[in-house]
Image (tube, rainbow, N blue to C red):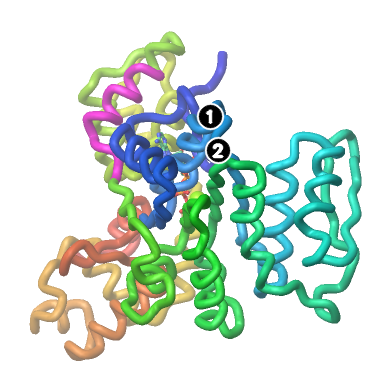
Amino acid sequence: MNIPFSFGKIVREDDFTDRAQETAKLLCNVRSLTNTAIISPRRWGKSSLVSKVLDMLSDDSEYLVVRMNVFKCEDQQEFYTLFAKSIMEQVSTSVESLVLNAKEFLSNLLPKVSFSDPLSRYEIAFGFDVKSNPISEDILDLPQKIACRKRKKMVICIDEFQQIGEFANSSKFQKILRNHWQEQQDVAYVLYGSKKHMMLNIFGEYKSPFYKFGDIMFLPKISNDDWKSYISSRFRDTGKSISPEVAGYIAQLVDNHPYYVQQLAQLSWLRCEKDCSAETVDGALENLLDSLNLQFINIMDSLTEKQRNFLCALSDGVTQLTSEKTLSTYSLGTNGNVRIIRNALLKRDIVDMEGRTVYIQDPVFKLWIVRQYSIL
Ligand SMILES: Nc1ncnc2c1ncn2[C@@H]1O[C@H](COP(=O)(O)OP(=O)(O)OP(=O)(O)O)[C@@H](O)[C@H]1O
Ligand SMILES: [Mg+2]
C-alpha cells in the first residue's frame, strides 16, 4: 500500500491541496507577463505552488518555461552561468536544438560552449574560467532575445532568489538585474525563496532596486477546513478512516503549517491500524517532537540567554512583551533590549510578525519550547 502524505519535497497532483485562489492568481500573472515575487515563512508551499502553475502552463505552446534554483550561487558570475545554462537547456528540446540555439544566442556573449550528452541527458558547459573571462551582464537579455526570435512568451522562475542578497555588492547587482529585466516585454519573472526576511528586504524596502518590480503574493496558510477534507480523503483512499474532528485536530496541533500537517498526518496514519483517534495523533506528535529534539536544541544553543527567554515568553502566550511583569518574569532586561532581541530573531526567521503581533515561525518548535522551558 502506498503511504499517503508527503513532506520535504515539492508536492503535486493528489498530494497538492487547495490553493485554488493563489493558483488562479499566479497563473493569471504569468499569462499576463506580470512579474511576481512570492513571500511566505518557510515551508508554506511556495515551490509547490509555482510547480503546479508551471505544470498547468506546460501544455500551452505559447509559453517557454524555465526554472532554476540559485541556492548554490555564490556570486554574480555563478548566477549568470546558471541563468544561461538553465535557459539554454530548458528551451531546447534535443541536443541538436541545443547546439543550434547556443550558436544563435550565445556566440557573441560566450566564446567557448561545449556539450555533453551523458545517458541522453544533454547538458551545456561553458569551457572557460569565468574569473579570468567574466560573463557580461548582457547575458540577462537572453530570455527576451529568445522570446522575440521564437515568437513566444517566456516565464523564468527563480527559487531561493534571496541568495542574491548574499553576493558582494548585492545592491549594485540588483540594480543591474532590474535594469535588464524591466525592459523585457515578452518575459515574466517569478521570484521566490525560503528566507522571508531577506525576501522582504529585496522586495519590500523602498530603497531596494526590486521595490515595485511586480506583484507581491504573500502566501497564506491552507485553512483548517481544507486540511480536514484533504486528510480525511487520503485516509479513505488508503482503506483507513479518520473523523473530520480528528483530521482537523492534526492540522490545528501544528497551526495548519503545510509541511508539518503532512508530516503529522503521515505519522498518525502509520500508527493506526484502521481508525485514527485523537490519542493516536497525540502519540504521533510525541514522535515528531522527539525526532526534532536535536535540531531544536541546536537552535537554542545558538541563541543568547535573553533570546531564549524571549522565545519562552512567546511560547507561553505572552503578548505584552514589554510590560514590567514580562520583563522581570522572563529576565528580558529593558524595553530597548526586547526590540533588539526581536529584531535579531526576525532576521534569523525564527520569529515573524503579523501586524504588531510577534510569533514563533515554527509551530512545532513552539510546542517543544513549552515542554522544555515553560515557567508557567
Ligand atoms: N498545496 C499543498 N498541499 C499539500 N501540502 C502542501 C502544499 N504546499 C506545501 N505542502 C507541504 O509543505 C511542504 C513544503 O512545501 P514547499 O517546499 O513547496 O514549500 P516552500 O514554501 O517552497 O518551502 P521553503 O520555504 O523551504 O522553500 C511540502 O513538502 C508539503 O508537505
Ligand atoms: Mg521552496
What numbered label is drawn on residue 313?
none
Q: Residues within 10 Å of mark 2 (few under 14, many from 20)?
A: many
The residue tagged 2 is 63
Which quadrant of the rendered structure holds the C terminus?
bottom left
Residue 225, percent from left and from top: 22, 30
The residue tagged 1 is 60
Looking at the image, which is closer to me, 339 or 114? 114
Which image quadrant shows ligand 1?
top left
Asked whether residue 186 is drawn in magenta, I would say no
For residue 3, above or below residue 369: above
Report helix, strand or loop for mark 1: loop
| Residue at image coords 66%, 47% | 149
| Residue at image coords 71%, 72% | 77
Asked whether residue 225 is drawn in magenta, I would say yes
Looking at the image, which is closer to me, 69 or 122? 122
In this orientation, does residue 270 appear? no
In this orientation, does residue 141 appear? yes
| Residue at image coords 33%, 70% | 204
Residue 44, percent from left and from top: 39, 47
**Callout 1 touching callout 2 (CB < 8 Å):** yes
Q: Over which residues does the magenta segment extend?
A: 221-234
Report helix, strand or loop for mark 2: strand
Q: Give the quadrant of residue 310.
A: bottom left
Cα distance, mark 1 to mark 2?
A: 6 Å
For residue 132, above or below residue 213: below
| Residue at image coords 58%, 30% | 61
